[in-house]
Image (spheres, rainbow, N blue to C red):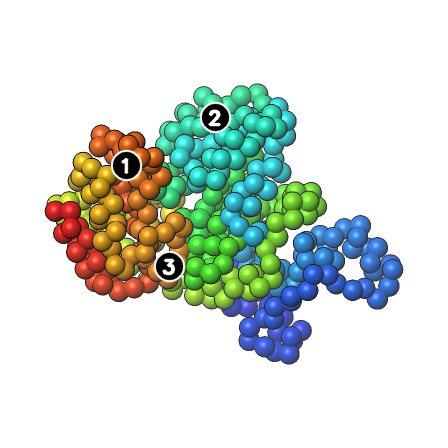
């Protein structure tokens, strides 16, 4: 299906809303019926229509169609946050007594789920180095029901061989799930590589404006219907119609925003690699990246996020660099119009900084839509402060 058609036309029946260019926001909690028979039909199968906006809603349904098509999937569900999509997707697969395999260093709230919440319900998780397929095979148990991937992750950008993991999982009847937030469907298509469930934090690139929280989960219609009638309706984590409308707006410019960010990222990357105070730069499509060959095979592109390791030996130097930045805002998340910086040491307790620990000296940068020369000057003056 053509990308331009998906973004600009799919799901939009303009005759239903007076030929308005932008679809309306159906800000309604529930929907009325002409007859008891019509009401009964949807109460028996709410997946088929509009009853209550905790389930389906016309504005959200337009977004669902577009996001499913972008992923090359049959169907999608949209949530109030990426964390909600993770929780709901995982909960739909596992039950008491099951075992999960998860890559090391996943998104923090995914780790919290696997480490602290699922064990309360009798579900255990093994974390593995996902750069070697053998580690997945060795971790499989008779009760393994889910393999959870994040490729690349969003700090050091470790990748997994998605096709190989999917083939292994299929051979053992294990469900696979991947966080594809870094790449978006424009730069990576996990379903085409055999992954069962694909999620994104739509808060990031899909929204693109840092004003919306959202998550998306895609898969076959059979899998998504099963999740809808059980976990989705019971947890009640559906996105609000207004936020869905904001995502529809963001989708219109997704392709050009990603391209702009990708172009700027390459320019900033080239400058950083030459700076004497930068020990290392992590970016999956940098030829010096350890998994560059795999990244080039799996990913059509990469935009925005890169991580630098500073040549410093004190926490104060890392913090001075970050505090000195004027145009990079210090914040979590990424994917909006604005450039961001996030130091790993921000999560360290006082006195725990270790100069021998590479990650403690790392700062993740998100390259937004500003002029790359403008951003390079900001990085230069901040690095001058610690020279």
Image coordinates of residue 286 in percent, x first then y, are: 26, 46
Chain-order first, disc 2 or disc 3: 2
- Viewer-proximal residue among 25 and 185: 25
Image coordinates of residue 71 in percent, x first then y, are: 51, 52
Position of 133 relative to 43 (above/below): above
User: Residue, x 43% and y 59% (percent of image)?
Assistant: 210
Report helix, strand or loop for mark 2.
Answer: strand
Image coordinates of residue 36 in percent, x first then y, are: 87, 60
- What crowding class fits label 3: few (fewer than 14 Cα within 10 Å), some (14-19), or many (20 or more)? many
User: Residue, x 47% and y 54% (percent of image)?
Assistant: 203
Q: Are marks 2 and 1 in contact (CB under 8 Å)?
A: no
Chain-order first, disc 2 or disc 1: 2
Q: Nearer the viewer, mark 1 or mark 3?
A: 1
For marks 2 and 3, give the CA distance: 34 Å
Position of 98 relative to 221 (above/below): above
Q: Nearer the viewer, mark 2 or mark 3?
A: 2
Report helix, strand or loop for mark 1.
Answer: helix
Q: Nearer the viewer, mark 2 or mark 1?
A: 1
Position of 1 relative to 290 (above/below): below
- Residue highlighted by disc 2: 126
Residue 178, visible in the rendered structure: yes
User: Residue, x 18% and y 39% (percent of image)?
Assistant: 312
Report helix, strand or loop for mark 3.
Answer: helix
Position of 93 relative to 13 (above/below): above
- What crowding class fits label 1: few (fewer than 14 Cα within 10 Å), some (14-19), or many (20 or more)? many
For marks 1 and 3, give the CA distance: 29 Å
- What crowding class fits label 2: few (fewer than 14 Cα within 10 Å), some (14-19), or many (20 or more)? some
Query: Toward which corner of the image does residue 289 lie, by quadrant?
Result: top left
- Residue highlighted by disc 3: 258
- Residue highlighted by disc 1: 360
Chain-order first, disc 1 or disc 3: 3
Q: Is residue 53 left or right of residue 34?
A: left
């Amino acid at each position: 299906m053509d990308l331009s058609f998906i973004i600009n036309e799919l799901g939009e029946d303009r005759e239903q809303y007076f030929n308005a260019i932008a679809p309306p926001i159906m800000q309604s909690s529930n929907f009325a019926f002409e007859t008891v028979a019509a009401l009964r039909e949807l109460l028996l199968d709410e997946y088929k229509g509009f009853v209550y906006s905790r389930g389906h809603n016309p504005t959200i349904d337009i977004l669902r169609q577009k996001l499913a098509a972008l992923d090359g999937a049959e169907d999608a569900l949209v949530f109030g946050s990426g964390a909600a999509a993770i929780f709901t997707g995982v909960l739909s697969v596992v039950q008491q007594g099951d075992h999960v395999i998860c890559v090391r260093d996943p998104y923090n709230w995914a780790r919290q789920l696997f480490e602290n919440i699922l064990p309360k319900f009798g579900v255990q998780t093994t974390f593995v180095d996902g750069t070697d397929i053998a580690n997945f095979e060795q971790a499989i148990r008779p009760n393994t029901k889910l393999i959870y991937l994040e490729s690349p992750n969003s700090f050091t950008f470790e990748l997994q061989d998605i096709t190989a993991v999917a083939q292994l999982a299929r051979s053992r009847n294990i469900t696979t799930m991947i966080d594809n937030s870094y790449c978006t469907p424009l730069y990576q298509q996990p379903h085409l590589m055999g992954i069962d469930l694909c999620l994104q934090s739509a808060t990031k690139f899909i929204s693109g404006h840092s004003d919306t929280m959202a998550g998306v989960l895609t898969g076959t219609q059979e899998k998504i219907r099963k999740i809808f009638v059980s976990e989705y309706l019971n947890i009640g984590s559906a996105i609000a119609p207004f936020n869905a409308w904001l995502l529809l707006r963001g989708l219109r410019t997704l392709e050009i925003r990603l391209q702009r960010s990708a172009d700027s990222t390459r320019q900033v990357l080239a400058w950083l690699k030459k700076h004497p105070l930068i020990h290392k730069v992590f970016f999956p499509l940098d030829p010096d990246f350890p998994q560059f060959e795999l990244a080039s095979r799996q990913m059509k592109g990469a935009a925005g996020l890169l991580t630098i390791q500073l040549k410093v030996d004190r926490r104060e130097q890392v913090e001075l660099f970050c505090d000195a930045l004027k145009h990079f805002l210090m914040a979590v998340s990424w994917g909006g119009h604005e450039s961001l910086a996030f130091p790993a040491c921000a999560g360290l307790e006082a006195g725990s900084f270790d100069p021998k620990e590479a990650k403690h000296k790392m700062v993740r940068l998100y390259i937004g839509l500003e002029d790359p020369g403008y951003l390079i000057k900001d990085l230069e003056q901040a690095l001058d402060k610690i020279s």
